[in-house]
Image: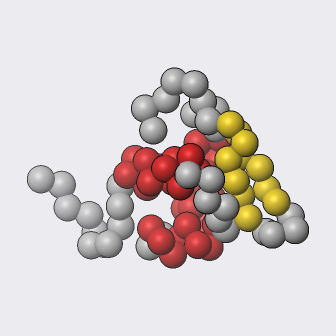
C-alpha cells in the first residue's frame, strides 16, 4: 500500500473527482477555499483546476465581482 508523506494529502485524482463534484453541484468557490478543503497549497489547487480546464475540457468561468469560479459546461464524456 502506498503511503503519502503528509497524512491529510489526497492524491491528485481524488482531489479532481471532489472538485468535479463541486463544479457539477454549481457551487461557486475560490481557490483558497479549495486549497483549504483539500489541505493543499493554493498553487496546487490552481494546477488541479488548470488541468481540468486544459486537459479534461471543463469550461469554468471566473466571476470577478464575487471572486469565485463556477462551472459553465462539463465535458460530455469524462471519468471525473
What is the x, y in percent for residue 35?
54, 70
**Location of residue 10 (image quadrant):** bottom left
Can residue 12 be seen in the rendering of this structure?
no
Q: Nearer the viewer, residue 51 or 23?
A: 23
Task: Identify the residue at image location x=73%, y=64%.
Answer: 68
Q: Quadrant of residue 54?
A: top right
Farthest right residue in view = 65
Residue 25 image point, x, y percent: 56, 52
Is residue 46 found left or right of 10 in the rendered image? Answer: right
Q: Residue at x 49, y 50 (%)?
A: 21
Residue 66: where, in percent of width, then height?
A: 81, 69
* Residue beneath the point at 51% across and 75% down: 36
Q: Is residue 68 visible?
A: yes
The quarter of the image holding the C terminus is top left
- Residue 12 locus on image (x, y percent): 42, 52
Q: How is the image coloured?
A: secondary structure
Q: On screen, 58 above or below 69?
A: above
Image-based side of 37 in relation to 26, left or right: left
* Number of numbered labels in the structure image: 0
The residue depicted at 71 percent of the width and 58 percent of the height is: 69
Q: Residue furthest top?
A: 77
Location of residue 51 with respect to 5 vertically, above or below: above
Q: Is residue 45 above or below residue 33?
A: above
Judged from this view, the residue extending furthest toward the left is 1
Amino acid at each position: 500500500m502506498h503511503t503519502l508523506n503528509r497524512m491529510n494529502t489526497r492524491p491528485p485524482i481524488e482531489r479532481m473527482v471532489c472538485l468535479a463534484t463541486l463544479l457539477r453541484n454549481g457551487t461557486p468557490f475560490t481557490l483558497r477555499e479549495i486549497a483549504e478543503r483539500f489541505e493543499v497549497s493554493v498553487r496546487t489547487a490552481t494546477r488541479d483546476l488548470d488541468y481540468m480546464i486544459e486537459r479534461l475540457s471543463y469550461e469554468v468561468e471566473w466571476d470577478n465581482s464575487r471572486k469565485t469560479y463556477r462551472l459553465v459546461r462539463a465535458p460530455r464524456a469524462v471519468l471525473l
